[in-house]
Amino acid sequence: MTGKTYTSGEMMTVAAARLLPDGAVCFVGIGKPSAACVLASMIHAPNLVLIYESGTVGTRPSVLPLSIGDGELADTADAVVPLTEIFSHYLQGGRIDVGFLGAAQIDRFGNLNSTVIGPYDAPSTRLPGAGGAPEIITHARDIFVIMNQTKRGFVDKLDFRTSAGLLNGGGERRRKNYPGRGPSVVVTDFGLLRPDAETDELTLVSLFDGAKAEDAVAATGWPLRVAGKLDVIAPPTTEELEALRDLNARTEAAHRTPVKLHLKKTA
């Protein structure tokens, strides 16, 4: 994307944010999912209800959280409820419209790995783990995934299946009566991938302005299918870029500020 006034990472965040409808209830992952969700709430979805695994409901963070336990989430939430209630009442109760996730690896059917790279018993890298992702991808009505597209991340075979997306494709998830539909879109730094209606295999359907389909194919660990007609995603608007850059600047400044603990002196 040479000559652009924005980066591919900014375009990816903006494109992901645009997918979120106003008023949706969204179970948010940390990192890129948070950036997309917070940006959406700032631009076009002021009634987006953000829920984090730690129990914060209707949170309105002004900076991006470092983790689900970040105090910013609780300080700006409408309510903070027990983790068990988040999963049993909200998620398993069918009250989550969108689960927004990231991962270390994804395969052609949207299954995710956030556990290990390499053999489970002797991995080269041990990742943060499942967290709430398996339950989110199972029970949320819809799933959005956001990941940088590389052969290391978009793999032919997962090193470990942490979260079940569309399983082995061909409607298997539907036949097994999973509550949610599974991943309906994967946002990358090239464009958007969506599952084929018959095979469930992820297919490149949209490209960012200036991106090339052949580059997306080359960055994928399986023979990536490309739709016959690719949509071109409009570049970020001035409003979107300014809001995202302001959010990132506030976040960077907040994370540089030392934490002050107010402790009482004891005799």
Image (cartoon, helix red, strand yellow):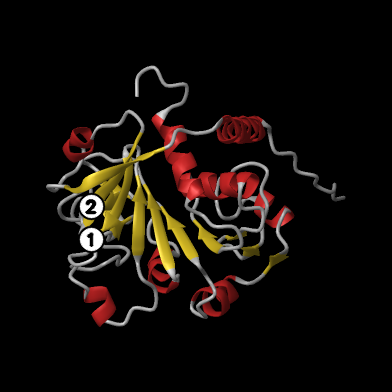
Residue shown at the point (26%, 67%) measured from the top left: 166
Circle 2/circle 1 CB separation < 8 Å: yes
Residue designated by label 1:
196
Secondary structure of the residue carrying numbered label 1: loop
| Residue at the image point whose x is 55% and y is 50% from the top | 37
Asked if one can make out residue 170 in the rendered structure from this viewpoint, the answer is yes
Tag 2: amino acid = Thr
- Above or below, 225 against 94 in this view is above
Instruction: Name the residue at the left extreme.
Output: 223
Residue furthest toward the top? 3
Q: Name the residue at the front extreme.
A: 229
Q: Is residue 53 left or right of residue 114?
A: right
Marker count (numbered): 2
Q: Work out how far the residue at label 2 is from the one at label 1, CA to CA, in angstroms.
A: 6 Å
Query: What residue does disc 2 label?
Result: 203
Residue in the image at 35% along x and 37% along y:
189
Who is closer to the viewer here, 217 or 115? Answer: 217
